[in-house]
Amino acid sequence: MQYRVLGNSGIESSVIGFGAWAIGGWMWGGADEDAAVAAVQASLDAGVNLIDTAPIYGYGRSEEIVGRAIAGRRDKVVLATKCGLTWEGDEGEFHFSADDKGLRRDGGPIRVFKNLRPHAIRRDVENSLRRLKTDHIDLLQTHWQDSTTPISATMECLLELKREGKIRAIGVSNCTVSHLEQYGPIDCDQEKFSLIDRAIEQNGVLEYCCRHNIAMLAYSPLANGLLTGSLSPDRQFGQGDLRRGHPRFTPEGIRKMNAALASLQPLAEAYHATVSQLVIAWTAARNGITVVLCGARNAAQSLSNAAAAEIRLRPDELALIEQAVV
């Protein structure tokens, strides 16, 4: 496993992080809790130390599963969670409607708001500490930015929490350069990034983070499973699954991506690896990317993700992988 420092925090993180979105079940068609615990523990056994979760993932369920999985091993974990998405009350900026399975484009019984007011952040932190069964959070990130709350007020609260010892490092997520400029001295930014989702390379966010020594955590590096090359075109996505009805995940879309990724099979075999591992290794090698957050539903997937850290791709191989999906 490779390790990299998160910005100016002094915290060393594995280059592969465990993304705990899917184990909450919500937006992913459900989850098996025992398998999820095993997935987290297998990651730790393989040298992964950063676990990234959030209150909204399963309305607290992901955090509870992570808390159960790291019991007795808290000192070995860089524990990252988030704040600012609330499903209780209507304070802040409306984000989306949902139910207990996932998003509801037709409206749903649960209304989720972006809320980064100081009292809301503190409520989120206390709830997260309880669910995670810990007395501090290593990295607290603002999940989505709230246009109804001044960033200065949000940042002041985060700095207070750091002084109090409840958090060790400050991060943001789903930001623009303007947001980053207003936040000031932060340690991390978490953004969507993959072979086919590269907006941060064009909109200035990645460049800004590189210039200011802000670590970049890449989420959805396998594009919700599409870049594994192993999804069946006949796969039926269950109610609430975020891939259900998405144009990328039509039978034709999956078939087309599988065909493109199949061209990488010879390279994968040369490294005794899978196509998924090549894609993860490409992401980890990209300039400015500090940590690649990989989801897993079971121990086997966790071990496969972690092994990608051992792959060192040559420049021509990096270019070959990139060209495969252009």
Image: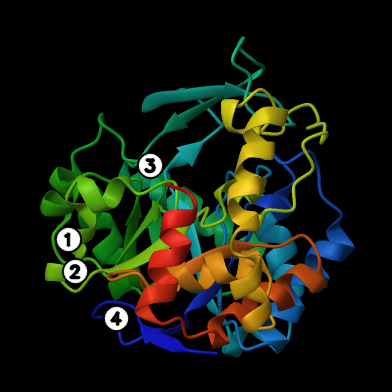
Inter-mark Cα distance, 2 to 1: 5 Å
* Residue 130 x/y as whole percent: 63, 62
Query: What's under tag 3, amino acid-wise?
Result: Trp
Dot 4 amino acid type: Ser
Q: x and y percent of residue 264 in the render?
A: 59, 64
Left or right, residue 9 beside residue 225: left
Secondary structure under badge 1? helix
The residue depicted at 82 percent of the width and 49 percent of the height is: 31
Front tag of 2 and 4: 2
Q: Residue under label 1, please give it.
A: 207
Residue 210: numbered disc: 2
As drawn, is 160 to the left or to the right of 113? Answer: left
Q: Are marks 2 and 1 in contact (CB under 8 Å)?
A: yes
Q: Are marks 2 and 3 in contact (CB under 8 Å)?
A: no
> Foreground mark, 1 or 4?
1
- Which residue is labeled 3 in the image? 144
Camera-side residue: 237 or 148? 237
Residue at disc 2, secondary structure: helix
- Say whether residue 147 is visible: yes
Number of on-image labels: 4
